[in-house]
Image: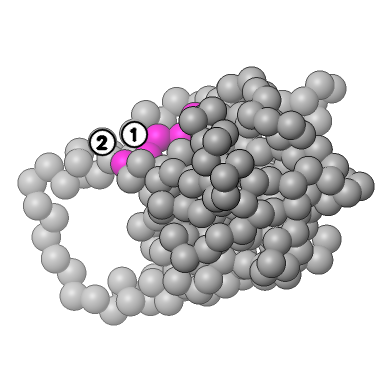
Amino acid sequence: MTIKHHPSDAILAAYASGTLDRARGLVVATHLSLCAQCRAAVQGFESVGGTVLEEAAPAAMSAGALQRAMAALGPLEIIQPAIAGEGVQEFPEPLSRYQMGPWRSIGRGLKWRAVDVASDDGVRVFMLKGMPGTRLPRHRHTGTEWTCVFEGAFTHHLGRYGAGDFDEADETVEHDPVVDAEAGCVCLVALQGRIELQGWLGRLIQPFVRI
């Protein structure tokens, strides 16, 4: 596996410091489970943060600080892993901790599956599966879209994104990804805001898009 597209240093530093929301953090964690280079970078950021903490002057915790921190973590129960038959894990390890909905068709050659991840920032997490050769409608975003590919590949004007690659889009990006003609593509997406389809056909089918 040759990974060419990675999260920015700012994203990796935010992940290392624990300041990413859980939804986008899951997409980054999925990339990290596949990318040794970025795991090493995160470890470096964590080491720097640890050094800063060691050198900082101690300060007393406010009353109830521990209780507030534990409440922010949310429930700690173990979620039933998403496992394929015969004990083989179907998806990257970080995804095994979350419940998923069924695959649903959202258009010719495309399927969508919700991932149950809480978010305080209006971010929805889902998986996309594209059949070989499928072209997604040209679209823009009203927010951010973080994507990690873990099977197959897709291509758009910024390059080819294969297994392990991380793609980041925002309001400035307009694209129409094309799924690999042989392998298809399965990826994890954290989407903030809406997808806005472009062109007359896009505007025509926009009311039927439920992502």
> Would you say 133 lies left or right of 193 here?
right
Name the mark on residue 71: 2
Which residue extends farthest right? 182
User: Which of 50/25 is in front?
Assistant: 25
- The reply to whether residue 97 is visible in this rendering is no
* Residue numbers of the magenta segment: 115-120
With respect to residue 24, does 201 lie above or below? above
> Would you say 177 lies left or right of 210 here?
right
Which residue extends farthest left? 63
With respect to residue 112, does 149 lie above or below? below
Q: Quadrant of residue 13?
A: bottom left
Residue drawn at point x = 80 percent, y = 30 percent: 88
Say which residue label 1 marks: 74
> In whole angstroms, how far apart are the C-alphas of marks 2 and 1?
6 Å
The majority secondary structure of the magenta stretch comes to loop
Q: How many marks?
A: 2
Amino acid of disc 1: Gly
Residue 208 colored in magenta in the image: no
Residue drawn at point x = 20 percent, y = 41 percent: 68
Amino acid of disc 2: Ala
Q: Secondary structure at mark 2?
A: helix
User: Which of 102/159 is in front?
Assistant: 159
